[in-house]
Image: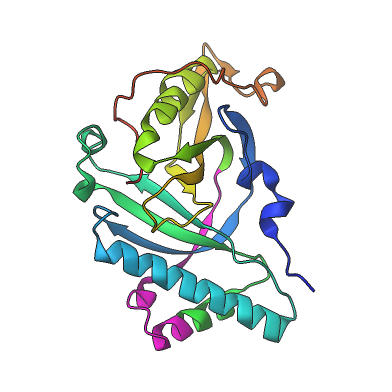
Amino acid sequence: MAGTDLKAERKDLYAPRLGVFVDVVVPPMTFLAIDGSGDPNVSEDYRHAIEALFSASYAAKFLSKRELHRDYVVLPLEGQWWAEDMAAFRTRDKARWSWCMMIRQPDWVGADVLSEVVRIAEEKGAVAASQLRPYTLDEGRCAQTLHVGSYDDEGPVLARLHDEYLPQHSLKPRGLHHEIYLSDALERRDDVVPLSVPFKSVMLGGEQLGSGAENEGREQDPGEQQEDTGEHPVPA
């Protein structure tokens, strides 16, 4: 019997449309996460973080199947990106970038299982396993799109998101830039990456804008582009 595919249950989150921005409401989710900083192209810490995440996540899958009798497909790698000085993205100073890499865990996988799988990952030699932590993320309403191509080519897409779509809909970012990697994040090739950012409505003259039904599902013209300012966090 095939395991549960949580991606298929929320295609709006894991299979957005290419070239348009849409509103999605993301429910609270539990992840195994690990924090770090530095250029992901060359950082050994980054590579160790990814290895630890997958080692522990597959251990959780096998424990769930054996002890809870619930099998599932391990979910893809995700990441949040930021920098203290956003100029680091304009100058491509990747050594100054910060990240939180994470893999979502099913709701039925509890804290006791997560603690156990961290121990298992350590025993299997995952160098960064001791740095893994449970992480509950409640992003709520987000603007999301799909990027296909090199990580370094995300800039114009994010410029449209931050400089066109959000202002045009009277919205402001309220959280970290969030990516989901549908292909191998350690491979240096074209990737399929849903991109999203939590946002809030803007208050103007006591009236809340950007939250009405007239803005739900509004799409950006995929033909419109804006020069990349480098102001937005994108991975390597």
For image coordinates 39% across by 18% down, the residue present is 226
Question: Image check: 95 left or right of 76?
Answer: left
Q: Is residue 172 above or below residue 149?
A: above
Q: Residue 118 or 195: which is nearer the viewer? A: 195
Q: Is residue 160 above or below residue 192?
A: above
Q: Residue 68 or 223: which is nearer the viewer? A: 223
How many numbered dots are placed on residues in this image? Answer: 0
| Residue 198 pos. (x, y %) | 51, 37
Magenta includes 134?
A: yes
Question: Image check: 94 left or right of 170?
Answer: left
Question: Image check: 147 left or right of 51?
Answer: right
For image coordinates 54% across by 58% down, the residue present is 76
Most extreme residue toward the bottom, as rendered? 123
Question: Image check: 161 left or right of 37?
Answer: right
For image coordinates 67% across by 25% down, the residue present is 216
Q: Is residue 224 above or below residue 148?
A: above
Magenta span of residues: 119-139
Question: Is residue 142 visible to us here?
Answer: yes
Q: Considering the image in quadrants, where does the N terminus appear?
A: bottom right
Query: Where on the picture, by quarter, is residue 112?
Result: bottom right
Magenta includes 25?
A: no
Most extreme residue toward the right, as rendered? 1
| Residue 13 pos. (x, y %) | 63, 44
Asked which colour scheme the image uses, the reply is rainbow
Most extreme residue toward the top, as rendered? 205
For image coordinates 55% across by 35% down, the residue present is 144
| Residue 121 pos. (x, y %) | 44, 81
